[in-house]
Image (tube, grey):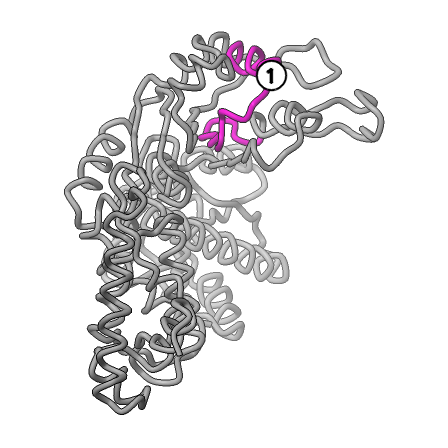
């Protein structure tokens, strides 16, 4: 076992007995009969547990405990004490000792205590690492972006993260609204508490109230047991309410009350419960239009919209496409056990020109599909889905007028294809090379335009 235990005992017989027993259990054991020397050893060595006598001449076990914890809070201390000083040993536990054991020491009990202490220490370490990884993955450092548009988004989100105010995130589907919500949570003071998400559009109206607030046993048909809602599950943390505009008006009143009074009741109960929850809501619709149309209460909108964050579409931040592609290539190559080293210039050019109606989520899907289908170490146009080549320039979401730019581009494409086929003697492989596209892409264009 790769663990070090320091035994501190002024009686040499007990010291050797305990140290010898622990050595046979496979631990690396250090010994000291003097507390001050024990402090020096703990400063020089990576010690996991200190097993210390309670009463010693030059320094008590409590004083040693205090000095050890001051130097290294990660060291666990177990106190050995005579029966008459058990109460003092319990006081030592209040000061930071992990446990105590009475003398004469039961070696079987000691073995179990040491094992449990090390397992607890390992669990604490793993939880700390997990929290760090979650913070890195879902915090702002986990968001891949180099555009000025997203820099502004993260600036606002970073400034609001440490507060408790409600945040409303808007943006098209697939832009990363939940990613921003998680970053706000994991970068704020509530990061040690739960992050709970609920998608209001995915739940029928009859279940949404129970999902948010929970229900009592017997509250309605099928409610055979008490169930906690998302507000209770998110206690002390953050509740992310996605597609908040889909909440029916009758339920919006209850949500508004939670925001105002910080209390709620489960379905079928009249007992108020505290709601210490930070709300981050999101919608892919225009909330002000919903207020005008009467589908979103104005008072609820203003309660949610203390700070507003609009995430731009991927079309508005094309600077982010290249770093996102690189990140997705790396991730999906590892997941699928492939050695994808890059992407061809032609394929990257096609990705840069595409309009991405599904935004970042669609780009992620495209790269994943391309990695799975690729037979080489480089992604080419052959690996991209055909829709990527259906480039349609957009201007504020408006369609190009009939007989306008799109039709002229298609006519020009047909003319170029006809000319390339003529010069290549109708050999599609050569024509595709002349056009700088793949043969598969050429066949797709021929079929699209009905050309023979």
Toward which corner of the image does residue 220 lie, by quadrant? Answer: top right
| Residue nearest the observer in this picture, 117 or 184 | 184
Which residue is pictured at 83% across the width and 22% down the height?
218
Tell me, yes or no, whether the highlighted magenta stretch contains residue 249. yes
Instruction: Give the quarter of the figure containing the C terminus.
Output: bottom left
Which is more toward the observer, 216 or 71?
216
Q: Any magenta on residue 239?
A: yes
Quick check: 47 above or below 191? below
Q: In this view, does 248 lie to the left or right of 120?
A: right
Q: Position of residue 207 (x, y in %)?
A: 69, 29
Quarter of the image where one finds residue 62:
top left
Q: Where is residue 359 in the image (x, y as percent from the top left)?
A: 35, 49
Question: What residue lies at 60% left-to-right and 15% top-to-bottom?
Answer: 273
The residue indicated by pointer 1 is 251
SS for callout 1: helix
Q: Quadrant of residue 7?
A: bottom left
Query: Quick check: 322 left or right of 226?
Result: left
- Taking the spot 51% from the left edge, 17% from the top edge, the residue there is 295
Relative vertical location of residue 390 with respect to residue 223 in this rendering, above or below: below
Relative to 118, does residue 386 appear above or below in the rendering? below
Q: Position of residue 343 (x, y in %)?
A: 26, 74
Is residue 132 at least partly visible in the picture? no
Q: Which residues, given as a range, are shown in magenta?
A: 233-258
Vertical comparison of 262 with 184: above or below: above
Frontmost residue, 260 versus 148: 148
Specify few, some or many for label 1: CA neighbours under 10 Å numbering under 14, 14-19, or 20 or more. Answer: few
Q: Where is residue 252 in the image (x, y as percent from the top left)?
A: 55, 15
Q: Is residue 425 visible?
A: yes
Circle count: 1
């Amino acid at each position: 076992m790769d663990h070090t235990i320091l035994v501190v005992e002024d009686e040499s017989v007990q010291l050797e007995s305990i140290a010898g027993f622990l050595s046979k259990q496979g631990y690396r054991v250090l010994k000291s009969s003097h507390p001050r020397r024990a402090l020096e050893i703990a400063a020089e060595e990576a010690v996991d547990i200190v097993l210390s006598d309670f009463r010693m001449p030059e320094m008590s076990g409590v004083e040693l405990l205090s000095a050890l914890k001051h130097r290294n809070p990660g060291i666990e201390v177990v106190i050995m004490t005579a029966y008459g000083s058990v109460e003092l040993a319990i006081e030592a536990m209040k000061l930071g000792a992990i446990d105590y054991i009475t003398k004469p020491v039961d070696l079987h009990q000691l073995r179990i205590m040491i094992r449990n202490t090390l397992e607890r220490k390992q669990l604490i370490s793993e939880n700390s690492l997990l929290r760090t990884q979650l913070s890195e993955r879902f915090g702002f450092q986990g968001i891949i972006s180099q555009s000025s548009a997203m820099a502004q988004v993260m600036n606002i989100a970073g400034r609001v993260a440490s507060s408790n105010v409600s945040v409303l995130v808007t943006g098209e589907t697939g832009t990363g609204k939940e990613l921003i919500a998680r970053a706000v949570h994991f970068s704020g003071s509530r990061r040690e508490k739960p992050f709970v998400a609920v998608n209001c559009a995915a739940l029928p109206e009859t279940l949404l109230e129970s999902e948010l607030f929970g229900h009592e046993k017997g509250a309605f048909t099928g409610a055979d047991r008490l169930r906690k809602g998302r507000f209770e599950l998110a206690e002390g943390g953050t509740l992310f309410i996605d597609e908040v505009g889909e909440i029916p008006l009758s339920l919006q009143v209850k949500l508004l009350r939670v925001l105002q009074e910080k209390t709620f009741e489960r379905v079928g109960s009249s007992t108020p419960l505290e709601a210490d929850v930070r709300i981050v809501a999101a919608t892919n619709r225009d909330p002000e239009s919903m207020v005008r149309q009467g589908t979103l209460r104005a008072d609820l909108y203003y309660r949610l919209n203390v700070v507003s964050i609009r995430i731009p579409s991927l079309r508005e931040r094309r600077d982010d496409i290249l770093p996102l592609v690189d990140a997705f290539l790396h991730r999906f190559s590892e997941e699928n056990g492939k050695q994808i080293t890059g992407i061809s210039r032609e394929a990257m050019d096609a990705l840069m020109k595409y309009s991405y109606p599904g935004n970042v989520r669609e780009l992620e899907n495209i790269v994943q599909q391309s990695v799975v289908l690729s037979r080489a170490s480089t992604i080419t146009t052959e690996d991209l889905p055909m829709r990527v080549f259906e480039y349609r320039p957009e201007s504020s979401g408006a369609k190009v007028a009939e007989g306008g730019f799109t039709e002229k581009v298609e006519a020009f494409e047909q003319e170029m294809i006809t000319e390339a086929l003529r010069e290549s003697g109708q050999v599609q492989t050569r024509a595709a090379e002349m056009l700088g596209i793949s043969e598969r892409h050429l066949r797709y264009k021929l079929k699209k335009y009905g050309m023979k």
